[in-house]
Amino acid sequence: MDIRDLPLKGYLKPLLKYLEKKDIVEICVNKEGEIALEDIKGQWHWFSDKNITRELFETLAKYLANKTTQRFGADVPSYAGTLPGYGYRLQINCGAMVQSGLAVSIRISQASKYPLTSYMSEEKAEILSEMVKDGKTILVCGATGSGKTTLLNALIDHIPQDKRIITLQDTPELVVSHRNAVHLIKSKTESDIAGLKYKHFMNAITRLRPDRILLGEIDTDNVLAFLKLANIGHSGSISTIHASNPVEALNSLCTNVQMSGESNATVESIYQFAKQAIDCFITIKKINTPTGRQFVVDYILREDVKNEL
């Protein structure tokens, strides 16, 4: 924690004993007076706590939103960001959008990076490393909490150090060691005071002389940006998507494009456009065992993915 930020230190005081527990991967609040912790074995532990209140998290959300020039209140009852001092992803929902009046999730980062060889054989790791170096566009597929971002960070390490990297995220989760890097932040809830949309960021990014553009997680807001970049010469992007396999990932991209309301193209044309944009699909699965979590990783090239609309 950044102890220089005294107000934040005070707001987090009721949460410290949970934030500093070992072997925890997620902290969730579903209602006032109760908190749940998920450990590395996938087991949930529940605690009654009178200090877990809606007022606590509303105060925290308002403070963090103000520090990042965003809005939080009755008109915008959702905050998405990073917990300062920890770097943990934070989601707070309050008010009418939640039946209980309160829903919170804090994703605990166990480690920023693992080497690729911790996921697969040296031979497979070397093949993926060469793809990254050659500027292939890669999409990492996996379920929620499967370790997609951690694997993505391992891949980023293989981007040559002389490349200029521009990242655009709604929550800072990518770890880039490159000196020549610029990190842009897009409000997840579009509650930033400036009201910036993806088109504003994309116009800026293409003028910032990028070698590689990293968008983090793909959703309805940035799916068109991701696909357009890959198809207009800005290859080398590495992103993640909630999907269990490449076919599901392509179908999810199609769904996201349609839900964005920014394209009248047919599903088939979107599917082929998306498939053409991505050179390699990596899948990651998390398996909970008595000794902890294990990750199963595999990859498939674009030409080997079957068309299954």
Image: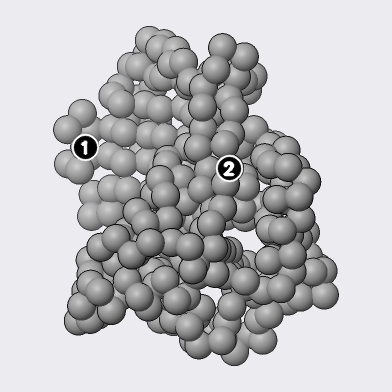
Residue at the spot x=42%, y=41% of the render?
143
Q: Image check: 287 left or right of 190?
A: right
* Camera-side residue of 117 and 196: 117
Q: How many marks?
A: 2
- Compared with 197, 116 (above or below) is above
- Badge 1: residue crowd in 10 Å (few <14, some 14–19, many ≥20): few
Residue 23 percent coordinates (x, y):
62, 20
Q: CA distance from mark 1 to mark 2?
A: 35 Å
Residue 68 shows in the view: no
Q: Image check: 148 left or right of 197?
A: right
* Camera-side residue of 242 and 280: 280
Q: How is the image coloured?
A: one colour
Q: Element at badge 2?
A: strand
Residues tagged 1 and 2 counted as in contact (Cβ below 8 A): no
* Camera-side residue of 34 and 57: 34
Q: State which quarter of the image contains the N terminus.
A: top right
Q: Image check: 301 left or right of 244?
A: right
Residue at the spot x=46%, y=45% of the render?
142
Residue at the spot x=82%, y=75% of the render?
162
- Compared with 268, 148 (above or below) is above
- The tag on residue 98 is 1
Residue 281 percent coordinates (x, y):
51, 58
Residue 122 percent coordinates (x, y):
78, 46
Residue at the spot x=67%, y=86% of the render?
209
Q: Image check: 220 left or right of 140?
A: left
- The tag on residue 297 is 2
Residue 179 percent coordinates (x, y):
81, 68
- Badge 2: residue crowd in 10 Å (few <14, some 14–19, many ≥20): some
Q: State which quarter of the image contains the C terminus.
A: bottom left
Query: Quadrant of the rendered structure where residue 168 is?
Result: bottom right
